[in-house]
Image (tube, rainbow, N blue to C red):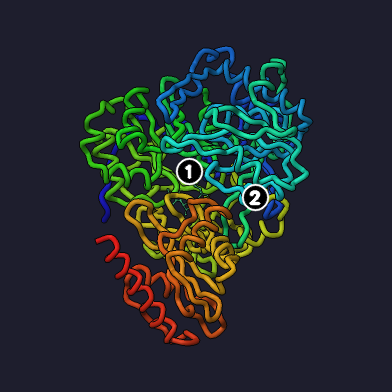
Amino acid sequence: MSETFNIGLGNHDEQNLRKKADSDFVSFWDDQAKNLSWFSPWTSALDWKPPFAKWFIGGTINASFNALDVHQDSKADKPAIIWEGENGESRTVTYSDMFVKVQKFANVLKSLGVQKGDRVTIYLPMVPELPISMLACARIGAVHTVIFSGFSAASIRDRVNDSKSKIIITADGGYRRGKIVNLKETVDDAIAGIDSVEHVVVLERAKNKIHMSDKDKLWDELMSSASVLCDAEKLDSSHPLFILYTSGTTGKPKGVLHGTGGYLTHLHSTFKWAFDIQDSDVFFCTADIGWVTGHSYVVYAPLLHGATQVMYEGAPDFPDESRMWDILQKNKVTIFYTTPTALRMFMKFGDDIPNSFDLSSLRLLGSVGEPINPEVWKWYFMTIGKERCPIIDTWWQTETGGMLISPLPGLETIPLKPGSGTRPIPGVSLDVVDENGDTVPSDIKGYLVVNNPWPGMLLTLWGENEKYQKVYWSKYENRYYSGDYARRDDDGYIWLLGRADDVLKVAGHRIGTAELESCIVSHDNVAESAVCGIPDDVKGEVIIAFVVLRNGLKFDSDVLQKEITGKIRSDIGSIATPKQIYFVPRLPKTRSGKIMRRILKTIGTGDVIGDTSTLEDGAAVTDVKKVFDETQKSIRKKSA
Ligand code: WTA
């Protein structure tokens, strides 16, 4: 029996939503969609031609209208974003400020030739102009594609080439741990030789020196001459709102494409149910907008509800380990949503730090992105929440658009179990199944699948309908394959057990092993490579790489390690940097030539190596183990 914690907010499912959802999930979501403002109503709630779902057919809507226009009568002066700069600056942007800026920037985009359906790449640090740019795109029906500002020039180039963006919005620089990162230079490198990019809009954030070409336009100059009024386009409910690239099991990131009406409905409902959002709340989600959590629960969900939120620009431990709690105390944050990686780091810093702040404004705590270890959950609950605040462990994915599993204190009270996200949200039916698609008995590990379409569901992968079908809908007929392992306990609670595919989660960021391996192999001296994730007590998982060099090569491993790491940084970004590279003579393979990553992982974690009888050459394991042990020994020596 696992421990349970009963924390209720006293809001119960008065309307019997669960019951309604169970009896007819389509009409349930039909009702939920009515919480938004539509220009014209839909004629049918769902058109499901597996694997393609369209929600609210015939309805017209606009995301920016629902985020801003609808609040202008009652909440014009309410802060939408309280922005905390890394260097201690702060700014408050009200709902009316946002409204004016978004309309103006929408006019700027139009003046640069952006039309409905065009893609716009956004590569900005965490500043209010990032959501402003996204909403301006949404306002005119342009499709935003935000790239996390830690990604490299090569990553931007691939994404821009794939989405065929005409415009890139960036900044001169962004602050990271007190240093200025020259974002404009990265964009210049990325688009050298790409003709499809017509303009680069540059926000002056850090005032660092940059090169401006004819294509480049300054944000402030464009805004100063832009007219103030821009009506929101009436868009089809399935009009694409954004593309967000995410790592999968192939060498190339996938462009996850989300629509408008279904996505917004999903966010509106889950934000209310999970966070119990009230007008007086101060919400703070620490996610970068470059990832899906930032799209859904920094930009769209809070704005749909007219909520006030804190947005932080920089690193959570800069200038010191108390920064997060300082921001919480200063802004009297009531709802805090962060990642297990951040929590493990805060926990390591010690209790004295949060204990020296007044965190009594908090009433609800959330976690997202990775499994949260029960001990971290309890620490969050006791030390940060002082046993008063429910913990909302939310499971979802870039592809799902919004939460699919979470406790819902805004709807119902359910005993919490540290480490479990409890149950699916109403209107979503999940199962844990075996290879054949049969439900596994309780407490047995299986694959997490979704039985029916849901409103926040991706439309497809940008330009790759077939791949979309293959990745998510081919393993089980008409059921969505999540790529995650899970188990269900006797009480029906779902426990997430990590990825079942070749996707790593490092500090909550998704990294595809195939993408990383193909980058390593593109180094001139490398013949073969295999990467895997090993447990880490802060980041959840860290990457180690095994590399086989081309024949007969003499090498200095320190130099090569630096070169390969440099290549990864410039091809992907520093988030994909392995903790250690092991140069091995060969890799363990099956008789059919498949690299046995399971064995490499076992070596990396120091566990007992099991059966190697299926291997083509068992001695490869001994060779790898030898290199591993020697490398570890020399690392220990160096650090002693
Ligand atoms: C993992 C992030 C356990 C999972 C929103 C999923 C989680 C992947 C949780 C998606 C959670 C997310 N507990 N694991 N609460 N939330 N994951 O696309 O493996 O960046 O498939 O979306 O993160 O990562 P993504």
Mark number displayed over residue 425? 1
Q: Whole-percent x and y of residue 218? A: 66, 26
Amino acid type for the residue under numbered disc 1:
Ile
Estimate the x, y position of residue 327 in percent, counting from the top left.
Answer: 36, 28
The residue at label 1 has a CB less than 8 Å from ligand 1: no
Q: Residue 609: x percent and y percent?
A: 35, 78
Which of the 4 quarters of the picture holds residue 443? Answer: bottom left
Q: Residue at x 51, y 76 (%)?
A: 595
Q: Which of 561 and 474 is in front in this view?
A: 561
Q: Residue 38: where, in percent of width, then height?
A: 67, 27
Q: The C terminus lies in which quarter of the figure?
A: bottom left
Residue 544 drawn above or below residue 423: below
Residue 160 position (above or below residue 103)? below
State the residue position of label 2.
255
> How would you rate the neighbour count of disc 1 (Cα within 10 Å): few for under 14, some for 14-19, many for 20 or more?
many
Instruction: Name the residue located 71 percent from the left edge and 39 percent from the top edge.
Output: 119
Please name the amino acid that badge 2 sits on: Gly
Camera-nearest label, 2 or 1: 2
> Label 2 crowding class (10 Å Cα cut-off): few <14, some 14-19, many 20+?
many
Q: In this view, does 548 lie to the left or right of 214?
A: left
Closer-to-camera residue (623/353): 623
From where the camera sits, is residue 241 visible?
no
